[in-house]
Amino acid sequence: MKDTAVKKLVIGRYSTPFPLILGGMGVRISGGRLAGHVARCGGFGTIAAAGIGVNSPYYTGRNFFAADIQAFKDEIRKAYAIAPDGVIGVNCMVAVTNYDAMVRAACEAGAKYIVSGAGLPMSLPALTADYPDVALIPIVSSVRAAQLITRKWLQNHHRLPDAVVVEDPDTAGGHLGEKPENIGTGCYDQYETVRQVKAYFQQVHQRHVPVIAAGGIWDRQDILQALAQGADAVQMASRFVCTEECDADPAFKQAYLDCRPENIGLIMSPAGLPGRALVGNIDRIRQRDLDAGCDCACACLKKCTFKETGERFCIIGALDRAQRGDVDTGLVFCGTNAWKADRITTVQAIFDELFMLSHQQKQSLAVNA
């Protein structure tokens, strides 16, 4: 296989030495520290917006939306303090109640790109109209979704996506934009979808739009495979959890180190979407929220079965508990390859492995950071 792993990634006005975007992991798993170090090492550093305010000094228990905005801007500033010239961006889920406000907050704080999924981000160009340099990157799992988004953006805003993430629901972690019955059937071909999306932009719009493969990317061979199959870059999330720089509690990281393939499975989120996580404690998560009562303090989701009927569990509470270290009654999202984590390492060491960086290359990157 031809070694094409070390190549520049250009999205909109921004470029990085390596074709890697950090996947957004909420709540506070990919915060400012992790995103800053990924950017410093030569990738696109992504801060996840979802629930970022709940474990912050601003949150009192009843001011979720105000705390979210303040904490989000803090994390973006934190990332830039680590990588002043890095490419720092955010992941904003369409499904959250304060989607519009968080997108605007990201722009105001200097985010260079916005990745958006968990729904079709039809309003994203309107929300960012005052910030035309911010690159817009929708997440899709089909060429049809890419077409729907593009047609809407062109019709209303005369804008194409700056890049597209094609997520593989059979391997990706967290919330998945696919019906549960369609996941794991063996019918989905991620790289055929990647090629279809690229061809759509080239043939219909005569434009090269970078397409990023997400889900199941763990090592150098996975990156080489993705690039050989037509992707311009990869999005990686789970691989960066077991790093010193990851914003999660050590117990969260240890859950990755301890897990096995059979511990990873699908859950139904109260958002109405399937998600991939460690599934051994789902009954305890539900029981914990039942014992605490069905008080929804955040109203974080536009649609939430827990808020509406008390069904399932509070997603933001479960993710927040895990991030703080309670992995017994907290929800640990992960991709299918999380079991491959075998040690706590550093972001730089992962980049060294993925892109076979020489000492001279690392010195050059440090100078330019």
Image (tube, rainbow, N blue to C red):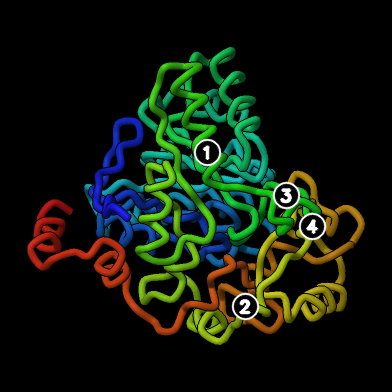
Which one is in front in this view, the residue at disc 3 or the one at disc 2?
2
**Marks 4/1: CA distance?**
22 Å
Q: Which residue shows up at 38% across the image and 56% down it?
A: 223
Look at the numbered discs 4 and 3 and tell me whether their residues touch, using CB distance below 8 Å: yes
Tell me how far mark 3 sits from mark 2, CA to CA: 30 Å
Give the distance between the C-alpha atoms of the residues marked 2 and 4, in whole angstroms: 24 Å
- Report which residue position mark 1 lands on: 103
From the image, state whether disc 4 or disc 1 is nearer to you: 4
- Label 3 or label 1, whichever comes before in sequence order: 1
Contact check, label 3 and label 1, Cβ < 8 Å = no
The tag earlier along the polypeptide, 4 or 3, is: 4
Classify residue 91 as left or right of residue 358. Answer: right
Q: Amino acid at mark 4?
A: Pro
Q: Quadrant of the C terminus?
A: bottom left
Q: Which residue is mark 2?
A: 261
Residue 190: x and y in percent read 56, 47
2 vs 4, front mark: 2
Comes first in the chain, label 4 or label 1: 1
What is the C-alpha distance between the residues marked 3 and 1? 15 Å
Residue 301 disc label:
3
For badge 1, the amino acid type reads Val
Q: Residue at x 60, y 57 (%)?
A: 51
Amino acid type at mark 3:
Leu
SS class of the residue under badge 4? loop
Q: Is residue 62 left or right of residue 150?
A: right
On the image, numbered disc 4 is attached to which residue? 270
Q: Mark 4: few, some, or many residues within 10 Å (few <14, many ≥20)? A: many
> In front: 131, or 86?
86
Q: Choose the circle earlier in sequence order: 2 or 1.
A: 1
**Which badge, 3 or 2, comes first in the chain's sequence?**
2
Instruction: Give whichever of discs 2 and 4 has the lower sequence position.
Output: 2
